[in-house]
Amino acid sequence: MIKRIIKTLSIIFVILALSIIYLSIFGIKTDKFNNQITNNILRINSKINLSLKDVNYLLNPYNFTINIKTTNPKILLEGRSLGIKEIQSNVALKSLIKDQFSIDDLQITTKEIKLNDIIALARVFQNSTQLFILDSIIKDGFVFANINLNFDASGKIKENFKIEGSVKKVETNIINKFRLKDFNFGFNISKNFFSLKQLDMELNDIKITSPLIEIKKKKNLFFVNGKFLNDNKNFDIEEFKLIFPILFNDIDVQKIEFSSKNNFSFDFNDKLKFNNFKIESDINLNRLTFKKTNLNLKPYLPSFVEKIKLEGHKIAINFNKNRFDIKGGGNILLEDKLDILSYQIIKDNKNLSFDTEIYIKNNSLFIDFLDYEKKEGSNSIVSIKGNLKKNNQPRFDLINLKEKDNEILINGLNLTKDLKIVDIESFNLNYKNNRNIYNKLNLIRDNSNFIIEGESIDASKMIDNIMNSNEESSSIFESISSKINMRIKKVYIDDVNYINNIYGNINFNNNKINDLKLEGTFPNEKKINLSIEVNNNSETITKLFSAYPKPLIKRYDFIKGFEEGYLDFYSSKQGEVSNSVLIIDNFKVKEVPVFAKLLSLASLQGIADILTGEGLRFTDFEMNFSNQKGLTTIEEMYAIGPAVSILMDGYIKNNELISLRGTLVPATTINRSISSIPLLGKILIGDKTGEGVFGVSFKIKGSPKALKTSVNPIKTLTPRFITRTLEKIKKN
């Protein structure tokens, strides 16, 4: 009996063991519990339905659970069918025996599912604004996923869920500005943490890859950080502008080719408001060609054309909120002449600061107002530091040019948009100019005033600019109201002539000279002084006296061989009208081309020969003239000398038209006329105007380079001519 019981129990044990082994290894397939599984899914969410075929039940003897597994089921969601590769779940054996079927966990392995269907499934559990926006911008894409879910007693998903998989061929279009296609990546999702791996995409036809992007959630904020890379590519400029519009505000980029490595981070809230955007980039700029529309460098760089090319630049970019920091260097080409450029540019909401150094060898450099030129092949360094404010007014903290023994240094220069000087702290000049003249000069700001001191300076270019300017005001300052104290040992007024020990002061009031007193001495010890003052009637009185006028007269091409004499100039200006008197005494001229032609036409060849030979001497020259808006009116110009005298009037308009007329008389005729005055006055002057002694009248008219001269050699002298001659002789 006992043996039979033992045998029976043994058989039962073997059968039970074999059943457990079979159920553990092979399980059983049945659809008996399909309704319970479906009901459990509906209990999780009533919008989700599950279409099952045969379900495999596999025993786990270690924890007395049943592993439920089904292949190729379908999740049915509001008309959508989501293809599933496999679903697994573990059910407690006890609940199955008691017919209290309850799913504790769920593992889902999907087939290729449309991304929009997955978003629709996610919206069933949480219909958020983000998912709605995501669903609206995604046009295409597929997802493969392994989903692990755990449920509490009420059927809600626990927070220890895990989802991993991959996304392929995503296409989006965000407000017709950012077009994303062929977006592929792998992902891992858990509570408050998302990671995207091995991303690659085309953003506006720009290929971008990323090894990793991580997203962490804290309360209602999402923190994103990651990396992205792009290979060397010649980019479509229009597409590039859409992504980085800040880079194209002031420049016209025509070609760009580069590769980059970038780290970025930002955060956003549950309403998709983005903040704290940061990016760090290392860029290999192979080529950049651009035009700066309001940048005119031609006067300074003769090789400059509209286009600037940058090649082989290594650039580091840091962007943080509204601060944009660029630091880099490489080759710069102006019309294919290569030099080296390094720079740092920082842009924020208030201004743009820059720190630039350019090593110039192959390009020439020209600074016109300083008459300085660096020729091709000579090494030089130009350093520029400053900033550009929102009103586009530049400030240069430093401008420094070094070339061999030449150096030009400017500190604290503030300019207007049209490059007028607002303020300057100091400048130092130490260079040889194109005339081979050594310039060594310092300017220092002393509160609101300035001090200019130096060894030597070439002022000829400045004098030329002032004399040739038709503008009422050619000041380089926007508005200056300061006193300038000046002491310079040597001031060149042309290639050869100079003035020693120029000293004095200049007072400016609202950009106009209110008071000026300057004195100096020529190398021959003869004095020159200049004064300007404004009197109580608001008249500007200018006085110039030179005991050595030759260097001043030499500037005028139509007079050659000027010698000796004294020059005295007086001018009174009120408003836009000036009245002036120029007097030169006891001088000699060797050649005046127009005057020589005039004498020849008047058959006074002997005097003409003297003019072009030894020269004509004049005892007196006086000219009264006025200026108004580019029109110079010569009211009277009178010159008298032992050989010839002349009286003339007319006008000169903007150096475009000259119109002069006058009377020219050999001195012998004048002397004979004057000696005859006591007895022959009635014959000399006559009963009618114009009767009497013979002279020569003339007219000169035309452009300065094409003057036409006409002469009438039979003309009686006017009373005015004789009167002026008598006045001069009496004065002498």
Image (spheres, rainbow, N blue to C red):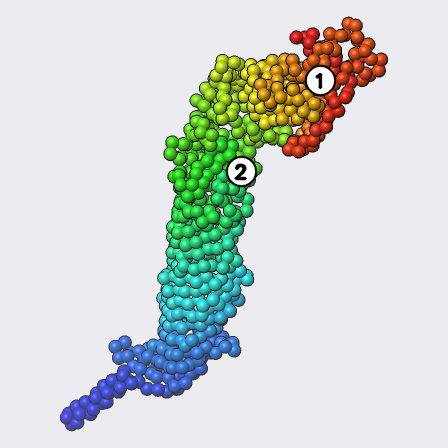
Is the C terminus in the top left, top right, bottom left or bottom right quadrant? top right
Q: Earlier in the sequence, mark 1 or mark 2?
A: 2
Q: Secondary structure at mark 2?
A: loop
Left or right of 662? Residue 38 is left
Marks 1 & 2, CB-CB < 8 Å contact:
no
Q: Nearest the camera: 442 or 670? A: 670
Q: Amino acid at mark 1?
A: Val
Q: Which residue occupies the extreme top position in the image?
A: 678
The residue at which mark 1 appears reads as: 665
Does residue 579 appear in the picture of this structure? no
Which one is closest to the eye, mark 1 or mark 2?
Answer: 1
Instruction: Give neighbour class at mark 2: few <14, some 14-19, many 20+ (Cα, 10 Å).
Output: some
Circle 2: residue type = Gln
Residue sitting at 42 percent across and 70 percent down?
A: 168
Q: Mark 1: give few (<14), some (14-19) or many (20+) Cα within 10 Å.
A: many
Where residue 256 appears, as percent x and y from the top left, is 46, 55
Residue 261 image offset from top left, x and y in percent: 38, 56
The residue sitting at 26% across, 79% down in the picture is 61
Placement of 409 over or under 640, stated as above or below = below
Q: Residue furthest right?
A: 687
Residue 399 in the image: x percent, y percent?
Answer: 44, 35
Screen quadrant of the N terminus: bottom left
Residue visible at 50% across and 57% down? 237
Tell me the distance, in whole angstroms, between the alpha carbons under discs 1 and 2. Answer: 61 Å
Residue 176 horizontal/vertical position (percent) = 55, 62
- Residue 137 numbered tag: none
Residue on which disc 2 sits? 393
Please identify the quarter of the rendering in which residue 375 is found: top left
Instruction: Let me know if residue 296 appears in the view.
Output: yes
Position of 439 relative to 115 (above/below) = above
Q: Is residue 248 above or below residue 428?
A: below
